[in-house]
Every structure is written in C-alpha cells, then in structure tokens.
Image: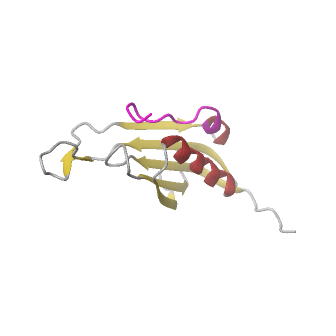
C-alpha cells in the first residue's frame, strides 16, 4: 500500500490558456504555473485538441493530482494573434486584429470548481 502524497502549499497557481488558430481541428495550449504570486514557475505545459470543457477538466485533474493547497488561482484566456484563413486569398494565416483576452481570479480551489471559467464568446 503506497503512502498518500503530501499536500503542497503554494501561494498561487496561474493557468494560461491560448486558443487555437481555428475553431476546428486545432489545439488549445495550456500552461500551469505555481509558486509565489507574480513569481510562479512553469509546472506543466501541454496542448489539447479537446473542447474547452475537457480542457478545464484536465486542469482540475492536474490540480487535484498534485494535491495543491493555495490561496489563489488566476486563469488567463487569450485568442491567438493569427487565424487560419478560411477564404480563398491563398494566404495560410491572417491577423486577428482584436484577439479576446480575459483574466479571472479565484480564491482557492473550491471557488475554481464551483464557478469554473467559461470559454470566450464564440468558442462555446
């Protein structure tokens, strides 16, 4: 029988989610930082081709598996600066002139679970 993992006390967890370059057949980029607020270190980084709800579920599972105990969780969501071009210009990428950005703050894990971040408008 293995011993349970100890609880890790961390001041802050920062989750950064960058949206794909297209709404279909692309990947969310997820980075999870941990440590003292405004001095967090990268703890995990991965790409996910899942829907936004599954991305948030994987973040919750990571935080639970690592057994964090912390005072705050910050979630930053941003659209990519470029889009895959869907029209027939022949240009593979076009600039997203108004990328959406959102920053949310949660007072610990329970607040994060009870009112999880929602996707940016247009990404439901």
Q: Residue, x 57% and y 37% (percent of image)?
A: 106
Quick check: 110 left or right of 122?
right
Confirm whether the magenta stretch covers residue 116: yes
Q: Residue furthest bottom?
A: 1
Q: Based on the displayed image, in which of its 4 quarters is residue 102 positioned?
A: top left
Q: Residue at x 45, y 52 (%)?
A: 49
Depth order, front residue of 106/45:
45
In the picture as drawn, the residue positioned furthest to the right comes out as 1
Residue at (68% x, 56% y) in the render = 65
Residue at the limit of the structure toward the front, as seen here: 88
Q: Which residues are magenta?
A: 112-124
Picture coordinates of residue 84, whole percent (x, y): 25, 48
Instruction: Name the colour scheme.
Output: secondary structure
Indicate whether 48 appears above or below 22. below
Quarter that holds the N terminus: bottom right
Taking 62 as reference, is 87 left or right?
left
Rendered location of residue 77, percent (x, y): 42, 42
Q: Is residue 89 part of the magenta span, yes or no?
A: no
Residue 118 % position (x, y): 50, 34
- In percent of width and height, residue 104 lies at 49, 36
Q: Nearer the viewer, residue 124 or 111?
A: 124
Tell me where residue 53 sits by quadrant: top right
Q: Is residue 43 left or right of residue 16?
A: right
Number of marks in the rendered image = 0
Q: Main structural element of the magenta stretch: helix, strand or loop? A: loop
Q: Quadrant of the C terminus?
A: top left
Occupied quadrant, residue 5: bottom right
From the viewer's side, name the closer residue of 21 and 75. Answer: 21
Answer left or right for 95 relative to 64: left
Residue drawn 57% across and 49% down?
A: 59
């Amino acid at each position: 029988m293995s011993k349970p993992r100890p609880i890790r006390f961390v001041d802050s967890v920062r989750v950064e989610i960058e949206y794909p370059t297209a709404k279909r057949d692309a990947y969310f980029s997820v980075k999870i930082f941990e440590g003292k607020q405004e001095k967090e270190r990268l703890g995990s980084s991965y790409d996910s081709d899942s829907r936004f709800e599954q991305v948030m579920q994987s973040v919750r599972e990571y935080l639970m598996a690592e057994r964090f105990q912390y005072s705050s969780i910050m979630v930053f969501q941003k659209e990519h600066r470029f889009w895959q071009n869907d029209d027939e210009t022949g240009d593979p990428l076009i600039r997203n002139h108004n990328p959406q950005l959102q920053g949310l703050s949660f007072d610990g894990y329970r607040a994060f679970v009870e009112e999880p971040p929602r996707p940016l408008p247009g990404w439901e």
